[in-house]
Amino acid sequence: MGESQRASSSLHIVVFPWLAFGHMIPFLELSKRLARRGHAFTFVATPRNAARLGAVPPELSARVRVVTLDLPAVQGLPDGA
């Protein structure tokens, strides 16, 4: 596939996985793999989980963006969960 054809068929995908950390890592890895194929990703996480994810590799930073979403406190869960 030519570069111009790839650019016209690329997607921007918003990923909002279940907020349990065990669900976030596989979705982030999938996002990075697909970003290497030319797609853009906005990955949604709580501030606490985003801090634990680690940095996006520099070569993917233009295609994978982590956005934090503050959620209201829920009784019985730690703050920021």
Image: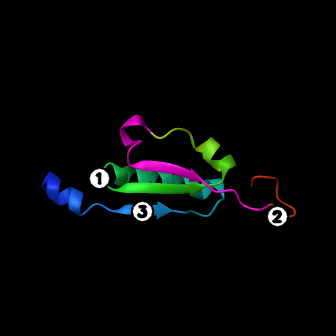
Q: Tag 2 or tag 1, which sits nearer the N-term?
A: 1
Pointer 3 or 1: first along the chain = 3
What residue type is disc 1 on?
A: Gly
Q: Residues within 10 Å of mark 1 (few under 14, many from 20)?
A: some
Image quadrant containing the C terminus? bottom right
Q: Decide: few, some or many residues near mark 3? Use Cα within 10 Å; few <14, some 14-19, many ≥20.
A: some
Instruction: Name the residue rendered at 60%, 55% in the picture.
Output: 45
Bounds of the magenta span? 57-72
SS at mark 1? loop
Name the residue tied to disc 3.
13
- Counting other residues with Cα less than 10 Å from the Cα at mark 2, is it few (<14), some (14-19), or many (20 or more)? few
- Residue 80 lies within the magenta run: no
Residue at image mark 2: 74
Looking at the rendered structure, the kind of residue marked 3 is: Ile
The residue at 49%/52% (across/down) is 28
Looking at the picture, the colour scheme in use is rainbow
Place of residue 77 in the rendered image (x, y in percent of width and height, measured from the top left): 82, 59
Residue type, label 2? Val
Q: Is residue 63 above or below residue 76?
A: above
